[in-house]
């Protein structure tokens, strides 16, 4: 038996590329986005009562992996990209049905004419991601106090993020770039302190290598500096408005 699933809306995200997207939702509270519901779901009645909810579950499609084969064992980034685990023990995007699940904060709902838009924060979703379902987060049922996961028992450590004078100047001159209620500078810090480097780059020295990514309509360039105690810091060198 097969099933057909249609999107109920698409994400508009600050992340236009996969590189740099947080590996879990809520790690970057200033990562803003929105989802506009498609007909026939773009009715006020469909979201009636949802304004009483602080967080929602989004079920979505890993659309950029839809044409790729799933793998029975994958290499989770959290384990350094070297250790393999069964696909069902991970949140890998290379899944039999390419379905993902994220809990995000619901900032507000707008219903104008026949347009229903949910404004979100703490997202970990690529721009244009198809959303196939929305459910309310229920704290007493969804937050299990004695739950454990020894694969990822604690939140990932973060690394310091510093800005060059040039980058600071540019941020000041684009007004701090308030984007849907979030600060661009704080978003850059939240993203880069998670260390988005590929696992094989982390293992080797990245000093001298430049990285870049897009957030909203700016291109950020950064590098890593060895702090001399087996740790590194991020140095944001330049920010260019596109």
Image (spheres, helix red, strand yellow):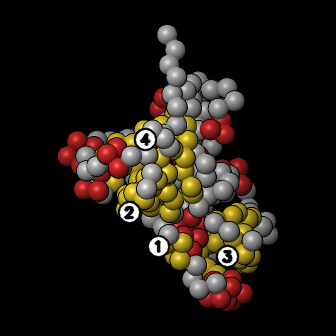
* Residues at marks 3 and 1, CA–CA distance in whole angstroms: 25 Å
Q: Which of marks 4 and 3 is nearer the N terminus?
A: 4
Residue 229 appears anywhere in the view? no
Dot 1 corresponds to which residue? 181
Question: How far is mark 3 from mark 2, CA to CA?
Answer: 31 Å
Instruction: Tell me if label 2 and label 1 are in contact, CB under 8 Å.
Output: yes
x and y percentages locating residue 117 in the rendered image: 45, 55
Q: Is mark 1 on a helix, strand or loop?
A: loop
Q: Which badge, 4 or 1, is on the more N-terminal residue?
A: 4
Q: Where is residue 164 in the image (x, y as percent from the top left)?
A: 69, 84
Residue at which label 4 appears: 41
Sequence-wise first label, 3 or 2: 2
- Of label 2 and label 1, which has the lower sequence position? 2
Task: Identify which residue is drawn at 59% across, 38% down.
Answer: 62
Q: How crowded is mark 4: few (under 14 residues within 10 Å), some or many (20 or more)?
A: some
Q: Name the residue under label 2.
A: 107
The residue identified by callout 3 is: 235
Residue 81 visible in the current orientation: yes
Q: Name the image quarter holding residue 214.
A: bottom right
The x, y position of residue 68, in whole percent, is: 69, 30
């Amino acid at each position: 038996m097969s099933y057909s699933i249609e999107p109920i809306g698409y994400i508009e995200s600050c992340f236009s590329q996969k590189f740099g997207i947080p590996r879990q939702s809520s790690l970057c509270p200033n990562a803003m986005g929105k989802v506009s519901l498609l007909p026939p779901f773009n009715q006020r009645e469909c979201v009636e009562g949802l304004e009483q909810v602080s967080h929602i579950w989004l079920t979505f499609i890993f659309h950029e992996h839809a044409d790729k084969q799933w793998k029975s064992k994958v290499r989770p980034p959290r384990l350094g990209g070297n250790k393999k685990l069964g696909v069902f023990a991970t949140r890998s995007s290379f899944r039999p049905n390419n379905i993902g699940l994220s809990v995000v904060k619901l900032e507000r709902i707008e219903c104008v004419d026949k347009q229903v838009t949910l404004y979100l924060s703490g997202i970990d979703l690529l721009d244009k991601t198809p959303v196939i379902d929305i459910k309310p987060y229920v704290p007493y049922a969804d937050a299990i106090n004695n739950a454990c996961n020894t694969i990822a028992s604690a939140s990932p450590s973060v690394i310091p993020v510093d800005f060059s004078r040039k980058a600071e100047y540019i941020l000041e001159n684009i007004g701090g770039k308030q984007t849907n209620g979030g600060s661009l500078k704080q978003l850059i810090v939240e993203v880069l302190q998670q260390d988005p480097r590929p696992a094989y780059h982390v293992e080797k020295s990245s000093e001298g290598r430049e990285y870049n990514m897009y957030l909203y309509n700016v291109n950020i360039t950064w590098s890593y500096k060895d702090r001399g105690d087996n740790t590194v810091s991020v140095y944001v060198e330049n920010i260019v408005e596109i």
